[in-house]
């Protein structure tokens, strides 16, 4: 009761950034929110098979104030603490309507810019730079600010949007989370695969595979033999399709070769493999399956669930594809906002390694693999 101000208050000078990140996990109507000293964590999950995590870093806000409340009395008593000094601060956690929050953020037609970003990112080709002007949606978004406030425990989450003197406030009802431990477990100390590449390449592959309406996505990766990394769609009404991320040869100008020639001491030519085999489009390619898997990692996932991450694939600059020993798949998307507030793939033509001096944020998806009986059920549907 010592705190006289709100538990949390933050102001963003660019509401479009918040909308872009939250829309990535907008595949379910509700999300669990946790306020921390470093930012706001939004978690969305469906049937314990897919989970999307969006973190609104405090760097996205021009001001960020967090006054954490103390541990509730019943929790302190359960822990056996009776003196006042035993109370500790904790981070508020509650559930809000994610769909209502997204609708609030696009009151001033923020979705115009967002939908444009999504369509442009379908291809890795850069957009037409002459297509934007002072009257396009991204330019108009720059003067919009957003204030988020959570005054006390059980209070609504208040969203205030301001544009050229016009203010709109929406109070979103907060609910107690049914289960505070809703994260899909991912073994960070048991990672058997880590692949980093431009997110647009993954998005294009999923889009191509989706044309055959598959029910199962098959992921295959090997560090020793081709195909080194491949995605396949199967189980649909049409034939199975596969996208392979292969090694390109020297006679192709857009990638390194799989083999190269070297001169021996006697002047003869010999062929030698690259010191480290990896698909050309990848920046990092680490595959180390446990002995029980052999030399290749093979995992199946429900294709419709993978598609729910398509918007994050479209707006992100890079993606880190990781798998653990249990088969849980983590897709961690890096979304970079430049100094003008534009994010990710909207920067068309910018190299994946370029730095704009803006803010880097992350959206993480986790997927539970299909078991053999799950594959049979999908084929019978």
Image (cartoon, rainbow, N blue to C red):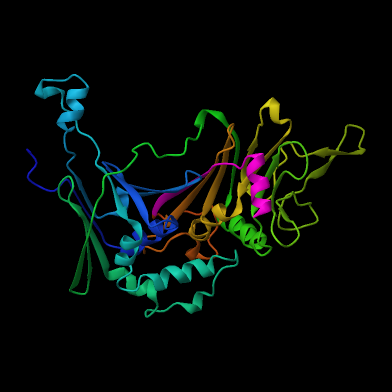
Q: What percent of the width, then of the height, locates residue 215?
A: 64, 55
Residue for point 17% across, 24% down = 77
Identified at 25% across, 64% down, the residue is 145
Residue 290: horizontal and vertical position, in percent? 66, 27
Give the side of residue 247 with respect to residue 188, left or right.
right
Q: How many marks?
A: 0
Which quadrant holds the N terminus? Answer: top left
Residue 147 lies, in percent from the top left, at: 22, 59
Look at the picture and state if 99 lies above or below 35: below
Return the residue nearer the eye: 147 or 327. 327
Q: Residue at x 39, y 70 (%)?
A: 111
Is 371 one of the magenta-colored residues?
yes
The answer to whether residue 84 is above or below residue 203 is: above
Is residue 331 something that shows in the picture?
yes
Q: Nearer the viewer, residue 307 or 175?
A: 175
Q: Is residue 58 magenta?
A: no
Using the image as rendered, state which of residue 378 and residue 13 is in the foreground: 378
Locate the C terminus and report the quarter of the image it occupies: bottom right
Q: Nearer the viewer, residue 34 or 39?
A: 34
Hey, which quadrant is residue 193 in on the image?
top right
> What span is colored magenta in the figure?
359-381
- Residue 168 lies, with reference to residue 354, above or below; the image says below
Q: Find residue 73 and report its horizontal and vertical position in percent.
A: 15, 30
Is residue 281 visible to the viewer in this orientation of the structure? Answer: no
């Amino acid at each position: 009761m010592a705190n006289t101000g709100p538990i949390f208050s933050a102001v963003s000078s660019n509401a479009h950034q918040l909308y872009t990140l939250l829309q990535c996990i907008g595949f379910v109507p509700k999300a669990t929110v946790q306020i921390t000293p470093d930012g706001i964590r939004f978690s969305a999950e469906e049937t314990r098979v897919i989970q999307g995590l969006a973190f609104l870093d405090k760097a996205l806000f021009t001001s960020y104030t967090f006054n954490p409340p103390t541990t509730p009395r019943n929790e302190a008593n359960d822990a056996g603490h009776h003196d006042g000094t035993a109370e500790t601060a904790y981070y508020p956690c509650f559930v809000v309507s994610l769909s209502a929050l997204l609708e609030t953020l696009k009151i001033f037609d923020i979705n115009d810019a967002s939908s444009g970003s999504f369509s442009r990112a379908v291809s890795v080709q850069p957009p037409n730079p002459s297509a934007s002007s002072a009257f396009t949606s991204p330019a108009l978004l720059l003067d919009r600010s957003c204030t988020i406030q959570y005054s006390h425990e059980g209070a609504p989450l208040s969203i205030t949007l301001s544009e050229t003197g016009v203010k709109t406030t929406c109070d979103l009802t907060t609910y107690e989370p049914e289960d505070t431990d809703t994260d899909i477990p991912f073994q960070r100390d048991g990672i058997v695969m880590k692949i980093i590449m431009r997110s647009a390449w993954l998005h294009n592959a999923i889009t191509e595979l989706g044309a055959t309406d598959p029910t199962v996505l098959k992921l295959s990766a090997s560090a020793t033999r081709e195909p080194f990394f491949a995605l396949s769609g199967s189980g649909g009404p049409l034939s199975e399709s596969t996208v392979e991320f292969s090694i390109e040869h020297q006679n192709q100008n857009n990638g390194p070769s799989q083999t190269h020639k070297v001169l021996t001491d006697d002047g003869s030519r010999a062929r030698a493999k690259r010191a480290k085999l990896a698909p050309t489009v990848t920046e990092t390619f680490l595959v180390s399956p446990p002995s029980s898997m052999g030399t290749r990692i093979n995992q199946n996932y429900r294709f419709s669930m993978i598609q729910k991450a398509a918007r994050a694939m479209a707006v992100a600059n890079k993606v880190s594809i990781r798998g653990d020993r249990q088969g849980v798949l983590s897709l961690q998307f890096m979304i970079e906002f430049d100094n003008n507030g534009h994010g990710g793939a909207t920067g068309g033509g910018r190299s994946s390694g370029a730095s704009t001096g803006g803010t880097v944020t992350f959206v993480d998806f986790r997927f539970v693999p299909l078991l053999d009986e799950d594959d049979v059920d999908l084929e019978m549907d």
